[in-house]
């Protein structure tokens, strides 16, 4: 049986405008933490803090890439990686526009590290996605974003 195929694109992550104050705050926190580490003779941690702060600043100014998604008869393809239906334990489509959120598809995979994958979806595709997943005997299980993602979003990351 050949199923229909859904294709869509979305940004890798939601781009946020960061003010100069955000970068000043990042710099002050990183530099003071690194200085405290140097005072306590923990030079490795100070180096790690400075390096991570620089990387965080770099990724804060980086523009998000466009990611291509495809739901086909084999599974969910994200970019060049495919998650086969037999490796998907369950799914959930969260659609709460009243909270100002965009629709998202959550997939619980067999991966040990970060088993829940969040994928932005187009509102018109929600019913098609649900029917395609149910047709492949993937159970529907309510899932939400992890609390750490909400905290990172609040902090401006």
Image: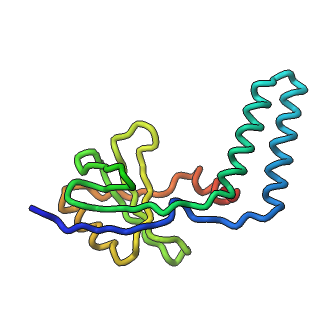
Instruction: Give the number of marks.
Output: 0
Q: Quadrant of residue 2?
A: bottom left
Q: Quadrant of residue 4?
A: bottom left
Q: Quadrant of the C terminus?
A: bottom right
Give residue 148's position: percent from left, percent from top. Answer: 59, 50
Left or right of residue 35, residue 117 in this image: left
Taking depth in this image into account, of 26 and 148 the one nearest to the observer is: 26
Give residue 103's position: percent from left, percent from top. Answer: 44, 70
Residue located 74% across and 43% down the image = 53
Q: Quadrant of residue 9?
A: bottom left
Left or right of residue 73, residue 25 in this image: right
Residue located 44% across and 60% down the image = 67
Indicate how the structure is coloured in the image: rainbow
Q: Is residue 32 above or below residue 18?
A: above
Taking depth in this image into account, of 156 and 8 the one nearest to the observer is: 8
* The residue positioned farthest toward the left in the image shown: 1
Give residue 128's position: percent from left, percent from top. Answer: 27, 71
Residue located 31% across and 50% down the image = 82
Give residue 144's position: percent from left, percent from top. Answer: 47, 58
Residue located 55% across and 74% down the image = 99
* The residue positioned farthest toward the right in the image shown: 39
Q: Is residue 98 above or below residue 65?
A: below
């Amino acid at each position: 049986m050949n199923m229909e195929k859904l294709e869509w694109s979305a940004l890798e992550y939601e781009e946020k405008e960061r003010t100069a104050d955000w970068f000043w705050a990042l710099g002050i926190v990183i530099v003071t933490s690194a200085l405290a580490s140097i005072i306590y003779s923990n030079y490795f941690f100070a180096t790690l803090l400075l390096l991570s702060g620089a990387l965080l600043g770099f990724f804060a100014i980086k523009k998000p890439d466009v990611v291509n998604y495809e739901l086909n008869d084999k599974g969910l393809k994200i970019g060049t990686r495919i998650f086969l239906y037999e490796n998907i334990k369950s799914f959930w489509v969260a659609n709460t526009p009243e909270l100002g959120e965009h629709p998202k598809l959550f997939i619980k995979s067999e991966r040990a590290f970060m088993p829940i994958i969040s994928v932005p979806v187009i509102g018109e595709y929600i019913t098609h996605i649900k029917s395609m997943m149910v047709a492949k005997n993937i159970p529907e299980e309510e899932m939400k974003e992890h609390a750490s993602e909400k905290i990172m979003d609040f902090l401006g990351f």
